[in-house]
Each structure stands twice: as C-alpha cells, then as structure tokens.
C-alpha cells in the first residue's frame, strides 16, 4: 500500500529556511496525483500549505505564497517543502499526503507527521 | 470557509453523534471528513460527502450537498473519541472534538 514519511530538521532558527522531505513508497509520484503539505500548529487545526504535481504545476495557500516552494525528485520518489524566512508562527506538525484531484479533492493517505519548532 | 458545529460534543457509548459542517458558498457534494486522534495523522473517513473510504466501518456516514453537510456516527464506541474535520480542497473546518464518556 502507499506510504508517506516526512523527514527534516526538528529545529529551525528564526529567519532561516524550513526544509522538509516526504518519501513515498508503494506508488510512483509520477502518477496522476498531486502531493501536498499540510501543517498543524500546536493545539490548533489543519492548514493546507500547497500542492505539487509531476507535470510542474504547483498551488500554494495565499498566506505563505511569497515564502514557499514545493518540488519533486521522481528518481528518488520524494517531494519537498521549502519555507523561507521562518518565524515562530511556522512552528507546527507538518504532514505530507496524497491528493486525489476529483470531486472533493481528498487527502489520503497521510504521513505520520514531523514536528518543526522555529526558535533560536 | 467551512464552519463546523458544535465545537465539542460529549456523548455516551452506544449513542449517535451528529456533526455539522457548513460551507460559505455552495460546493455541490465536494466535501470530505477526517478523524484525528491525539498524536496521530488525520484519517480519511468520507469523501464526496457520502462515500466511505476504504476500511471505514459503516457506523460512519456522511450526507448533504450545497452548503450543509453532516457526519453521523452511530453506536458510538470509546475509540471514536477524536477531533473530526471537514475539508474541501485547501480549506478545513476548525474541527469538532467528540468525547465519549
């Protein structure tokens, strides 16, 4: 079955770049799906960050659009999140997931998540 | 914008839970529901308003279209305690916390 696993630094200094990797197994990321990042600040709800497709299309939430970039490496079956100029407000659990772009555009499956803290 | 109600719901085992999600504009049946337990990733329950995801028990059902949607959980079990979110593409509701006591 399809599995996703997030990885990256758990601690990022303010003003630096937050970089995460999602490794996908059980399915090629070159298939006809979008791949997404969703975050959850401590004690709060879910926030979609953005989506990326192997055809080069990306979509980002307007709240982070000026600071975010998503990309893929099909040879490694991985996709990536880069968020520049990190602040304490970026402290969150970060999840990667697969997006089925049909109807309600649902996210499934999800990775287990990785906690990123922005602090000096 | 998706608005969920109530914020918190406390019920007993065996009862039925009714969770609501209201969209600020009509979205046809394009709505999904997720369950999230503490320390875990969200799990897809329902997509396209009423279709159950693979492996989800038939105690979970979804209904609605347009702007008003409902997630119903029948015969509540203690393990149903969780936060439930509705979602439509890049938008999530704020969540309903369901407590089974």
Image: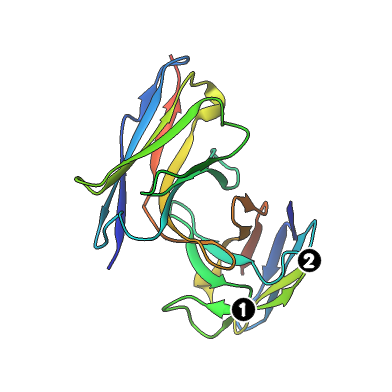
Can residue A38 be seen by looking at this rendering?
no
Query: Quick check: B68 above or below A21?
Result: below
Residue at left offset 59%, top offset 50%: B90
Instruction: Please say whether residue B3 is visible from this viewpoint.
Output: yes
| Foreground of the two, B93 or B51 | B51
Q: Nearer the viewer, residue A107 or A95?
A: A107
The chain letter for the residue carrying disc 2 is B
Residue A80 x %, y %: 35, 38
User: In the rendered structure, which disc, 2 or 1, sits on the residue that comes first in sequence?
Assistant: 1
Q: Which residue is tagged 2?
A: B67
- Left or right position of A62 against A112: right
Q: Which residue is mark 1?
A: B50
Q: Quadrant of residue B59?
A: bottom right
Tell me the quarter of the picture where residue A69 sits.
top left
Residue in the image at 27% along x and 45% along y = A78
Q: Position of residue A30 (x, y in %)?
A: 30, 55
């Amino acid at each position: 079955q399809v599995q996703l696993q997030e990885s990256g630094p758990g601690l990022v200094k303010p003003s630096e770049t937050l970089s995460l990797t999602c490794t996908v197994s059980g399915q090629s990321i070159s298939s006809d799906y979008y791949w997404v990042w969703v975050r959850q600040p401590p004690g709060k709800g879910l926030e979609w960050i953005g989506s990326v497709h192997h055809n080069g299309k990306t979509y980002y939430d307007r709240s982070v659009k000026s600071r975010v970039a998503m990309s893929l490496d099909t040879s490694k079956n991985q996709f990536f999140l880069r968020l520049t100029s990190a602040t304490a407000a970026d402290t969150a659990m970060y999840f990667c997931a697969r997006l089925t772009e049909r109807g309600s555009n649902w996210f499934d499956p999800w990775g287990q998540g990785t906690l990123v803290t922005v602090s000096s | 914008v998706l608005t969920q109600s109530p914020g918190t719901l406390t019920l007993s085992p065996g009862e039925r839970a009714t969770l609501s999600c209201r969209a600020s504009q009509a979205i046809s049946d394009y709505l999904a529901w997720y369950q999230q337990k503490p320390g875990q990733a969200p799990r897809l329950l329902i997509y396209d308003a009423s279709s159950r995801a693979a492996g989800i028990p038939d105690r979970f059902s979804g209904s609605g279209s347009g702007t008003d949607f409902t997630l119903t959980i029948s015969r509540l079990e203690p393990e149903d305690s969780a936060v439930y979110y509705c979602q439509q593409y890049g938008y999530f509701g704020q969540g309903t916390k369901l407590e089974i006591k």
